[in-house]
Every structure is written in C-alpha cells, then in structure tokens.
Image (cartoon, rainbow, N blue to C red):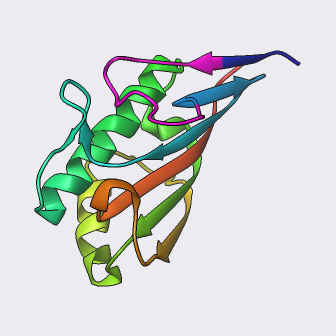
Amino acid sequence: MSKSVIHTDQAPKAIGTYSQAVKSGTTVYLSGQIPLVPATMEMVSEDFTKQAVQVFENITAVCKASGGTTNDLVKVNIFLTDLDNFATVNEIMSQYFKQPYPARAAIGVKALPKGAQIEIDGVMELPE
C-alpha cells in the first residue's frame, strides 16, 4: 500500500517533523491543527470561539487537499485546555459536519503548542 504526504497552503505549514496529513490507501491521517492563520502562521486571536473556528477551517482545508470533506472524517480528537469550552465546540462543529457525525473524543490538556486553547486531529476514510 502506498503512502503519500498531503500538503496545502490553505492550512498552516508543518512546524516540526510531521506532515499536515498522510494518506495510506483510502485512509487519511490528519495531524493536529491549532488556530494558526495559514498566511501569517500567527494565532488568529485569544478568543476561544475564533480559535475554534480557525481550527475547523484548517481541518477543512486539509480534508479538501486530501480529496475529501469533513464529512469523510470517521474519528476526531479534540484537545482543550478548558473543558468548559466544550459546548462552544459542539456548536461550531455542527456548522462543519453533517450526520452521521464522526466518532469523537474530547480531552482536557494542560497546554497546547503556541498557547492554543484547542487542537483537533482526525482520521478520514475516502470513498474508493
């Protein structure tokens, strides 16, 4: 089975030893996205809602570059520095996904890269 790297300028470039996503067969593994604006590589805002929207925009861009959409995501992990923001994540997520929703985990963490309040990664299964 072949493995290919996914890259798009519409999402933040990798800032370490990783790829935005890797496709193996019809499965795509998306690296975690934080709320960086792709053009500037700066945090979008200190406001949690704006950070969450930016993360979903970044995830959407990587899904598109992979040949799919957010609705092809089968598993999503959401990392939050404050689990009290989970209701906001649900509200924003509903704007990016249609049923059936992916399997999902929400994990409270002490800190995220660059002081982000949210990070999301996921696994996509593309139609054959």
Taking 52 as reference, is 107 above or below it?
Answer: below
Q: Nearer the viewer, residue 45 or 26?
A: 45
Residue under the point 57% across and 29% down: 19
- Report x, y in % for residue 121: 51, 49
- Report x, y in % for residue 31: 54, 41
Q: Nearer the viewer, residue 72 or 66?
A: 66
Asked if residue 12 lies in the magenta stretch, the reply is yes
- Report x, y in % for residue 39: 20, 24
- Report x, y in % for residue 45: 11, 53
Asked if residue 54 lies in the magenta stretch, the reply is no
Left or right for 60, reference 95: right
Residue under the point 37% across and 34% down: 60
Looking at the image, the residue that sits furthest to the bottom is 84
Q: Quadrant of the N terminus?
A: top right
Residue under the point 49% across and 18% down: 7
- What count of labels does the image hold? 0
Q: Which quarter of the figure has residue 52? A: bottom left
**What secondary structure is the magenta-colored segment mainly?**
loop
Q: Quadrant of the C terminus?
A: top right
Left or right for 71, reference 12: right
Which span is picked out in magenta?
5-18
Taking 14 as reference, is 46 above or below it?
Answer: below
Left or right for 126, reference 68: right
Q: Which quarter of the figure has residue 110? A: bottom left
